[in-house]
Image (cartoon, rainbow, N blue to C red):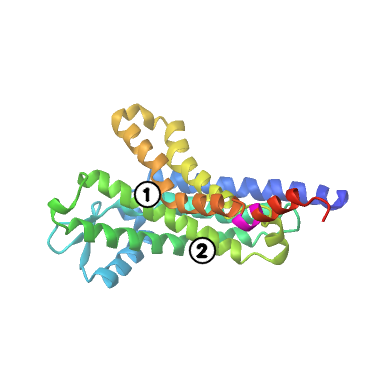
Amino acid sequence: MNIGIHRQLKPRLIAQAAVVLAIAFGMKLGYSVSNVNELKWILAPTTFFVELVTGEEFWFESYTGYMNRDHSFLIADSCSGVNFLIMAFLMLCLLKIRKGLITRVSWIFIPAAIITAYFSTITANTVRIAVAIRLHRMSPEMVWINPEQLHRLEGILIYFGCLMLLYGCAESLEDTASRRFDARHSLFRRSLIPLSIYWLMTLGVPVLTGAYRQGGSFWEHSLFVLFTPAILLLPLAAIRWLSKRPSPSHYQSEHAFRSFPYS
């Protein structure tokens, strides 16, 4: 890269990164002090789509959440998915900022990332809650772990899976120069980007805010967060390992070359 261009890009990238981090911090801070009434901007559309998918009926109870008809399921503030929204926003912005290392990136990517992350969150929330309702209706004899652990496992799988899917879609839409930039990395290595962001939000932030003082419940949650994504990453790791193994024809050709070095 031309040194002059690089010097022009660096202050711009720093400024863009600072704005992205400030927005993410503001969203996290706002979420931490918000009640369910103040989260209707994301809970209301989520509930609407959950009703469409599941056929359940919900109504809003102030400072409680969206309750279904038989009072057996509540969509509360913890179901808002704001943490996923922040992760999706950071991940999308990271893609653009990384692209900014080789070319100029317009500031428009920040509002575009917010909008994309918002609708992605509603989609992920809808899937998660619809599956949770289905699991809630299952007979206890069919569930091999306790309901709280099952709910946690289901949430991690769906949120991390949606984050991976969003990353793959966003990366595939990048221009040719960006794809060349990413072509040096395998699919498995690229998956470490959403994984790192997921761990940062679900483990790093709670540790920084002192959530680890909760004792056993936090450490149990941490084990789920650390190991559950491996269920989704193991196939990618297997593909990467198999792709790096030399084929039988490679061994045969190498053996033939060593047997007839002067042919």
Q: Earlier in the sequence, mark 2 or mark 1?
A: 2
Drawn side of residue 84 relative to residue 129, left or right:
right
Q: Residue at x 56, y 60 (%)?
A: 113
Callout 2 secondary element: helix
Q: CA distance from mark 2 to mark 1?
A: 20 Å
Q: Is residue 116 magenta?
A: no
Mark 2 nearby-residue class (10 Å; few <14, some 14–19, many ≥20): some
Horizontal side of 102 relative to 203 (left or right) equals right
The residue depicted at 76 percent of the width and 47 percent of the height is: 10
Is residue 99 among what the camera can see?
no
Q: Amino acid at mark 1?
A: Ile
Q: Which mark is residue 201?
A: none
* Residue type indicated by callout 2: Thr
- At x 30% / y 64%, what residue is drawn? 47
Q: x%, y% of residue 83?
A: 43, 49
x, y percent for residue 186 = 61, 53
Depth order, front residue of 201/29? 201
- Figure check: 165 above or below 262: below
Say if residue 71 shows up in the picture: yes
User: Which residue is under mark 2?
Assistant: 116
**Front-most of 96 and 44?**
96
Left or right of 99 on screen, residue 72:
left
Q: Which residue is mark 1?
A: 156
- The residue segment tinted magenta is 247-251
Q: Quadrant of the C terminus?
A: bottom right
Choose mark 2 or mark 1, whichever is in front: 1
Q: Residue at x 68, y 66 (%)?
A: 175
Q: Nearer the viewer, residue 262 or 128?
A: 262
**SS of the residue at dot 1?**
helix
